[in-house]
Amino acid sequence: MSPRIQFPLRHPVQIPQMPAAEQLGFGNYPAPIVFMMEHDGNGWVNARLEPYNPAEHGIRFSSEEVGAVTADRWVIGWVRQNFGASWRKLSDPQVLDRLTPEGVLSIEALASRALKLAEIHRHYGLGHFEGLKAYSGHDGIIRRFRADQNAKRQNQACVRMKMPQIPEALWLSAVDAVVAANAKAGWIPTVPGYSLYIRPVMEAVNEALSVRPGTHFRFFIICCPVGAYYPGGMHANDLFVETDRARVPPGGLGSVKARGNYADMEALDRAKAVMQRIDPTVQISQLIWLAAEDFGKPPQLRRLEEVGTSNLGLRYLSAGESRFMTPCRDRGTILPSVVMDSCLELLRLRGSTVVTGDDLTLQKLIQLAEGGQLQELLGAGTAAVTSPTGRIHAILNGKYHRWQVGDGQIGAVTQWLYDRLTAMQYGHEVPPNSIRDWIVEVPT
Amino acid sequence: MSPRIQFPLRHPVQIPQMPAAEQLGFGNYPAPIVFMMEHDGNGWVNARLEPYNPAEHGIRFSSEEVGAVTADRWVIGWVRQNFGASWRKLSDPQVLDRLTPEGVLSIEALASRALKLAEIHRHYGLGHFEGLKAYSGHDGIIRRFRADQNAKRQNQACVRMKMPQIPEALWLSAVDAVVAANAKAGWIPTVPGYSLYIRPVMEAVNEALSVRPGTHFRFFIICCPVGAYYPGGMHANDLFVETDRARVPPGGLGSVKARGNYADMEALDRAKAVMQRIDPTVQISQLIWLAAEDFGKPPQLRRLEEVGTSNLGLRYLSAGESRFMTPCRDRGTILPSVVMDSCLELLRLRGSTVVTGDDLTLQKLIQLAEGGQLQELLGAGTAAVTSPTGRIHAILNGKYHRWQVGDGQIGAVTQWLYDRLTAMQYGHEVPPNSIRDWIVEVPT
C-alpha cells in the first residue's frame, strides 16, 4: 500500500443533492468536489480539493438568483484583514446567510479560475485524460479497479506529449481523496451497476499563441455519478466498418488518450446516415476502425484497430478450439485498454487460448464470419465494461454487406467477462490471488 | 463592402503598455482586448469586446496589490439595483479610485469566465482556430489580408466538427472590431515587418464527460503583436523528412485547423535529436510530412503533404521550363493555405506554370534534387509568409541522405512572392485589379 497523501479541502461548498438514479445517464452531472493542482515549471504545487465550479457551487450570480432574494439590491463583500481572508456581513441578511466562510468561494479563488484565452491547450490540443471508476459495493465499501494502470497510462501520455509525469502515489492519493470527498457528499450512487466515473485531465496552460510545448500545466480530476451503460440491460450492437476515415495517423498519438483522437464527431453520423438509407431498422452504435497505414490497400486487406473508442476482441473457432484474439498493439495506434487487458488475463486464468492478431485484417474477419467460426466480437472499455456485437455492416466496392456474429446475441464469453469484472468491482467476488491487487478499497 | 456590425466594449480596461518591439517575438504577449460571443444552442449571442483576462486586466487580486494600498483592509463591492449593474464606493478611498465603472470587471463577469472543468473541448479536442494578421502600413493605415478566406475556412471546420457556422459578415466585423480596439490601445506595432496576429478560436463548451457533439459554443478572437518571423532576415532552412509518423489520418481532420493536428510536440524534437548525432552543425527547422495512407509503402514511394504547419511548394525545371508544384489537396489531409493560394495566384498572374502534383512522392523530389532540377522548395503560411529551404535531410533504409535545394540559399521566386505579398500588406503596392479584394482597410 502506497503512503496516503492528504489534501486540504479549500473553499468548502454547499453540497447539491445528487439527481435521482434514473436521471444520471453517463457524463451529465459533475460531482461537487474536484481535485486540482498546477505545475509551475518546476513541480506540481497547490494540490487541493475544490468545488467543481465556483459559479455554480459558490456564489450564484444569475438574475434568477437575484430575484430569489427579497431585497431589490444586494452586496457581496470581501474583506481582507492583515493578509488573511475572511467574509463579513455587508448587507441583506438573506444573502448574508450564504456568505459564511464555509459556504462560498472568495473573489480571489474566482479570479484564479478565470478563463485564460491564450492557454496553449486551447489552440494546439495539448491535453490528455484518463477514465476509471469507483464502485459503491453491496457492502457499502467503495472500491476502485486497477487505478494504478490508469496512472501508468496517463504518465505514458505525459511522455508522449512532453508534459510532466505525476508520481503514482500522488496520482492514486488524489483519486482516493476526490472519491472519498464525493462519497462523503453523497454523490456515489449505490444502485447496482451504477458508479462514480473518474476523469483525470492534464492540460498545458502556459499562455502562448505559437506552436510550442507546454511549460506550465493544470491537472484536475472531475467525477460524475453514472448509471449502467446499457440502461435496459446489456444488448448486442450493430457495428459499421469505416473505410473512408481512420482514427489516428501512423506513429501518432493513438496509443494515448490525447484529446484530438476523439474530435471527429461526424464519422459515426455518416455511418448512421448511410445505414438509414439501406435499412432504417438498424441502429449503428459504433464504427470499426481500420489501420491508417493500410489505406493504400483495398479495405479488405486493411487491419482492424479499434471499435469506437474501445479495444476490439473476438472469439472464434479454429480447428474446433475456441480462441480469443485482439489486434496487435505494437504499432502505437491502439490505446492499451485496462479493461481489455483484464479480460485477456481472466481468459488466461481460466485456460483459454489468447492470441494477438498481428494480421487481423477485415478479410480475415469476414472469412471467420462467413465460415461460421466467428462466435463473438466485443469492445472492452471502462464505460461499458464489455460491449457485445450482434452484426457487422460494411460497404465494400460500393456493395452493402452484413455479417452476423455468433447467434447475433450476447456471447457467452462476453457475458462471463462482464459478470466477473463487475462482481469484483462491487465486492461480490474476491479476485484470485494472482490478480488480488486489481481491487483496492478507498478509505472514506 | 459588407455591412459593419458594432460591438459594445464591456468592462473597459486600463491598457497596459505594449512591450518594446524587440521583445515581441511570436505569440508571447496577448493584446489587451478580445472579441467574445457564445452560442446557446439556438444562435450566437452576447457578441462583445472584453479585456483579455479579467484577473490580469481587471481587478488585481495578488497580495502585492493589497500591499500597494495604504489601508490594511479593503472591500470590493458590487451593487445590483433594479437588475442594472453599477459600482459603488464601499470603503478605502484609495481603492475606490480603482473601482470606477470603467476600470474594473464586475464579479458577474468574473464568474461568467470561471474555469469550467467539464467543458467538452477539454476532453475531446472539440476546438478549431484560424490565424491571420493585420498590418500597420507605412501610411498609418491598418490593413487585413484575405480575411474572408479565413472566415470560409473556419466555417468549413465548423461543418467538419459539427459546430455552428458564423455568418461571414459577423466574423469579419468581429475581426475588424477587435483589431480597431487594439489599434486604439496602441497595440499594433508600426515597425516594418511587424504585425498584429489574429487568432479566432471556436470551442464546444457544454459540460459533459462522455463523447458527444457540442451543443453550446464559445467563439473568441485573441490577438498578439508579433515581430518579423525571421528576426535576422529570411534565411534558408534545413528540413527533415519524417518517415515514422504522419501528421493526420486519412479522411481525418487534416484539412481543417483542428487542435489535435498540432499536438505531437515530440516529432520535431526527435528529428532534431537524430540530426544532432549525425551533424551537430545542422539546425532542423521543420519536418516534411508524408501521406499516412502511403505508410504501407517504402518512404520513397509516399506522397509529400506538408512542411511543418505550412503548405509545401516547389519550383523545378522540366525540359528547360520552370514550374511551380504543390501536392494535391483533394484527399482532405492538407490544410488549404490562404498564403499558398495567394502564391499560386500571383505566379499565374505573372504567367508562370503552376501544377498540382497528384503523385508528388519523395522519390520524385529526390530525382529532381539529384538531377539538378529542384530550384526551390518553400513553406507558405501566415506566420512566416514564405519559408525557403536550403537542404533536405532524411534517413532512408537506415542510411542518411542530404540534398541541396537550388544553390542552398533563398530562391528567387520565394523572395519575389515574399516581397509581393508584404508590399501589398503594408500598403507599398496596390494589388492588381483581379485580386484587388485581397487587401481591406480596417476602419479605426
Image (tube, coloured by chain):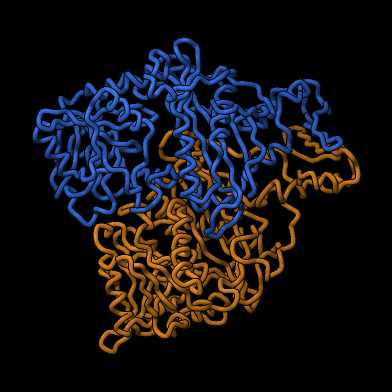
Chain colours: A orange, B blue
In the rendered structure, the answer to whether residue A178 lies left or right of residue A239 reads: right
Q: Position of residue B74 (x, y in %)?
A: 78, 29
Q: Which quadrant of the figure has residue A195?
A: bottom right
Q: Position of residue B243 (x, y in %)?
A: 23, 48
* Image point (18%, 35%), residue name: B279
The residue located at (36%, 22%) in the rendering is: B421
In the shown orientation, is residue B433 left or right of residue B204? left
For residue A43, say whether it is visible: no
- x then y, percent, for residue A412: 44, 85
Towards the viewer: B5 or A354: B5
Q: Is residue B59 above or below residue B367?
A: above
Q: How many marks?
A: 0
Q: Quadrant of the C terminus of chain B?
A: top right
Residue B81 visible: yes
Instruction: State whether residue A265 is above or below residue A37.
Output: below
Q: Nearer the viewer, residue B122 or B68?
A: B122
Q: Residue at x 83, y 39 (%)?
A: A88
Residue at position x 63%, y 60% in the image: A28
Give the residue at the far front of this rendering. B434
